[in-house]
Image (spheres, rainbow, N blue to C red):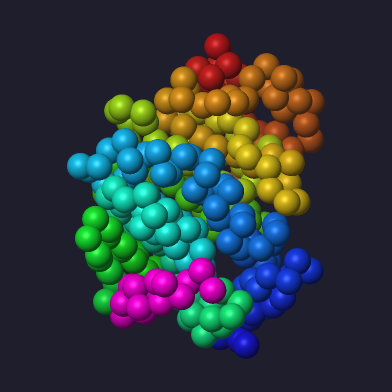
Amino acid sequence: MRDGDFELITLRSGSRAVRHVVHGEVMHPAGGPWQEANRLYVEQPQLAQRLMQQPDAPVRIFDVGLGAATNAVAALTCAKTFGGQLEIHSFELDLAPLRLALRDTEGFPFLTPFHQAAQALMTHGEWSAPGIRWVLHHGDFLSCLSHAPHDAELVFYDPFSPQHNAELWTPSAFSQVRSHCKSDGNGALLITYSAATPMRVSLLLGGFFVGAGASTGTKQETTVAQTMCERLVHPLGARWLSRWERSSARAPIGQATLSDEDEAAVRSHPQFS
């Protein structure tokens, strides 16, 4: 099936996934969408524990790149299982992937319990249930971000890769995300599937503290970023900085070369002091 610039495909694992027809990038290619969503975005940030530890206030999530709603539904499923309060703000420019996934109930069975919720989200821009609120920000992410809350606790950063969506991976973009993150308490945790050096430089220059994230079926390492360095389990350290200094890809996303100012900013980043 195809809808606009997107089509459904079957991965070698047998799982169904959504692929962009023009540039060919597949959403959640590592072992299938459901496995990757749960490993990176639910288990890694210990979402169940977060929900149970703050039953009187919602865990607020920014879901950047709604896609087929896999990450969002993984979080919703966790909330339904363990209780607590959850508020998800999903950002998406094109709803075709979600429409496709909802039509393929056999390929995306995890969406079935939230089929009506997803339909309501697309139709009305919001869906709620006891303890749960799911909001859609439909349009360009950085434009929509200006209308979003300023205290996100978790950020699922899952847009297309810098190769096809570079504007969302620049230091400026991450700085804007950082300004909408929670800074008190345990801070905010950003999770993304990429481990590329230029992307990590963008995060550092965007005001985050950066660490190594969980592995996936195809990647030995992903990336997490925090507003509070002490909350990182595996922060990048002297070894990463040394590799970066020798790398041929030292500049952040969106820049062909590394400026003297940015080089100094990375070297003097509080994370490495």
**Residue 218 against residue 214 in the figure, above or below:** below
In the picture shown, does residue 271 fall above or below 156? above
User: Residue at image x 20%, y 42%?
Assistant: 56
Which residue is at a point 48% across and 72% down the rendered structure image?
111
Residue shown at 64% from the left, 20% from the top? 237
Q: Vertically, is 8 above or below 53? A: below
Q: Is residue 22 above or below residue 71?
A: below
Residue 144 in percent (x, y) is at 34, 60
Q: Can residue 156 be seen at all in this image of the molecule?
A: yes
- Of residues 162 and 195, the one nearer the viewer is 195
Residue positioned 78% across, 31% down in the render: 247
Evaluate whether residue 256 shows in this view.
no
Majority SS type along the magenta span = helix
Q: Quadrant of the C terminus?
A: top right
Image quadrant for the N terminus? bottom right
Magenta span of residues: 109-123
Residue occupying the far top of the picture: 273
Q: Position of residue 69 (x, y in %)?
A: 47, 66
**Horizontal side, residue 43 vs residue 260: left or right:** left
Residue 178 or 222: which is nearer the viewer?
222
Specify whether residue 112 is painted magenta.
Answer: yes
- Locate residue 173, reporting x and y percent: 47, 47
Is 84 colored magenta in this rendering? Answer: no
Q: How many marks?
A: 0
Q: Nearer the viewer, residue 155 or 247?
A: 155
Depth check: give the residue in front, 270 or 17: 17
Q: Horizontally, is 128 left or right of 171 in the view?
A: left
The picture places residue 260, in percent across and down from the top left corner, at: 62, 26
Quadrant in the picture for residue 241: top right
